[in-house]
Amino acid sequence: MSGGVDSSVAAARLVGDGHEVTGVHLALNRNPQTYRSGARGCCSLEDSNDALRVADTLGIPFHVWDLSERFAADVVADFVAEYAAGRTPNPCLRCNERIKFAAVLDRGLALGFDAVATGHYARLETTGGETRLYRAADAAKDQSYVLGVLTQAQLARSLFPLYGSVKADVRAEAAALGLRVAAKPDSHDICFIADGDTAGFLRRELGERPGQIVDTAGAVVGGHDGHHQFTVGQRKGLRLGTPAPDGRPRYVLGISPVTNTVTVGPHDALAVAHIEAIRPTWAVAEPRLGAWRGLVQVRAHGEPMAATIEADADRVRITLDEPAFGIAPGQAAVTYDGDLVVGAATIAAAA
Amino acid sequence: MRRHLDHAATAPLRPVAEAAWAAAASLVGNPSSTHASGRRARARLEDAREQLADAVGAHPTEVVFTSGGTEADNLAVLGGAAAGAALGRPRVAASTVEHPAVAQAVASLGADRAHWLAVDADGVVTPRALATLDASVAVVSVVAVNNETGTLQPLDAVLAAGRRAGALVHSDAVQALGHVPLVFAASGLDAMSLSAHKIGGPVGVGALVVRRGVRLAPVTFGGGQEARLRSGTVPVALAAGFAAAAAEAVAEQQGEAERLGRLRADLVGGLTALDGVVVNGGDRVSPAICHATVTGCRADDLLLLLDAEGFDCSTGSACAAGVHQPSDVLLAMGRSEADAAASLRFSFGPSTTADDVTALLAALGDLVPRARAAAG
């Protein structure tokens, strides 16, 4: 229970369904802020108190679990290391994989609970011993992408009570229940970067490492103070000294951490049709090996793209029907069969 | 049914305290007013003061009502420090196992003015530490009964060392009242802190008992209603409830100490029979507190499980943002961070029965392995 409206209503629905529910708020930050600032950040004392008051209203036990060490090691350090390696990680996915549906789930199961429930918007369906993960009814809120890394063992112990609702109805339900968080703003951005300044956060973590910005021909067109300040597909903030010959905008095409070089070029050059992804995980019970037709999503709010998907035990090769732009190593490629989440893999290369 | 094994956090209100409070709560009149209603309130307040003084072996003029134990501790430490500073004694000494109300008050003076007294493995302040007291020290503050472990401090030795240094000697006696014999006059202490709600009195009132002739400086400012030391309108009804609770608790003390001592012995026996459980604090302990380290557990997990089974208990140590912190008291006793984060306090009171202890031990037999599994 983050103290937000979604997890609050999720808890309320479970209570209403007759489950024995215990509220858990995760303390993920060693030194929490006293108050939250707008839509940013989380785990402030104000958020914890909001969650506590919801639990009070629902009449359920409430506990705060300090997972700040695990979070720092498994999520924040990984986030920084991925940027240092020239990749673009998704920390929410990582948190679901390592914290919410791993550390929290394991602790809960050991304590005698049966499942972890969250306020995520995604649908689960159990048939014939398989728990299938589907997109939520509210396409605008669908969070199946950030849950795409979960496996059968995790999904079988998960509950997403908001699967069939749209956000407006969830807020109305919270208000009807008398929960004061009904009108609380949604959280956006990365929870551990409270001011929303990712580049500034990475500069503090990784320091400044001046390097060169080159074009596709290898000509130096500018400088930067650390390749980790950039993401493939980025256009803003390049501050290039030499204009492009054709005067058109340039984008980050690639990042080379070894040489600390950022390569820029025209939008066309961002087009990608082939994706190589590694470390596949499977949300479905049987890995989908071999070639199959499906959909691929590479960002939390990205469009699903039609593709031919070919997987073996170690990697997934994806050929998109239509080229896509701004696909960065480190992002997760989540594969879908219609609305069914099939699996996920980490993008290693795109061309 | 809830089983309340957290009397050291707060104890159920005693019927005599509730009745005394209710009778006084309807009185109109500020005890500082000189009109008839004010005099009637003043009379009720002085009745309470005398009743409390009788209960703890003090003279009524020595009782300074406060908002609770925390304020009493702050007043003793900071009021003693301010008075001492004017006499060329800038420092305050306290043990490393004090309640935060003393420890944080001492720390607020700055590292240069804090003189920490080390403790042994049972949490008892050492003779060697007491020998370090010198003429720079204005106040020595050592808790009578530790609020986490229940360990009794050698107050006679503290007093002797304090006297040798020429310092005032204060003791936080919040967990002593009603559980161990407590006679202020015979103790030789210069000041001691008391709280009402730990003994079944109302929350929101306590007292600093200050020996006649001892000069403390006020730390909050106003009308000086209580001995020109503590300002603010005195809550007559709360004082009446406090005094009634104290009178009853002290009258019952000897019998309750014997009864709870037997329950504690049963609990200690059952706990130490469990694998990897040790009881902390040594042999000189309050009969009302039992503090145990359950190795391989998170205290938070055990508390969650016990809570779900109907047991109210706690770690007894500080909680930050809902998360229990490793116990400073255990760390001061030389224990590891892991032990300090794996310890629970069970504390008894008049409502505690042998059945509570039996049920607790039965539950722990099942819950400890679960909590250990959860800690991974």
Image (cartoon, coloured by chain):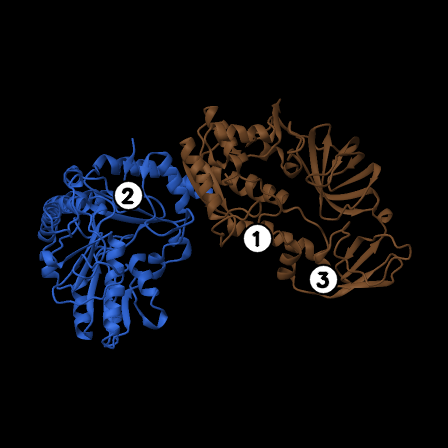
Mark seen at residue A226:
3
Read off the chain for label 3. A
Q: Amino acid at mark 1?
A: Ala
Q: Which quadrant does the N terminus of chain B fall into? A: top left
Mark 1 on the same chain as mark 3 = yes
Asked where in the image residue A324 lies, by quadrant, the reply is top right
Q: Amino acid at mark 2?
A: Asp
Residue A86 on image: x %, y %: 73, 55
- Describe the element under mark 1 as helix, strand or loop: helix
Q: Write down the residue under mark 1.
A: A73
Horizontal placement of A304 versus B47: left or right? right
Along the line of sight, the residue nearer the viewer: B219 or B345? B219
Q: CA distance from mark 1 to mark 3?
A: 23 Å
Residue A304 on image: x %, y %: 75, 34
**Which dot, 2 or 1, sits closer to the camera?**
2
Q: Residues within 10 Å of mark 1 (few under 14, many from 20)?
A: few
Residue A248 on image: x %, y %: 87, 52
Q: CA distance from mark 2 to mark 3?
A: 55 Å
Q: CA distance from mark 2 to mark 1?
A: 36 Å
Question: Nearer the N terminus, badge 1 or badge 3?
Answer: 1
Q: Amino acid at mark 3?
A: Gly
Examine the rendered structure and indicate whether residue A86 appears above or below residue A109: below
Q: Residues within 10 Å of mark 3 (few under 14, many from 20)?
A: many
Q: Which residue is depicted at the point 73% across and 59% down? A: A227
Mark 2 on the same chain as mark 1 = no
Along the line of sight, the residue nearer the viewer: A72 or A291? A72
Q: Write down the residue under mark 2.
A: B6
Read off the chain for label 1. A
Q: Circles 2 and 3: CB distance less than 8 Å?
A: no
Along the line of sight, the residue nearer the viewer: A304 or B80? B80
Q: What is the display colour for chain B?
A: blue
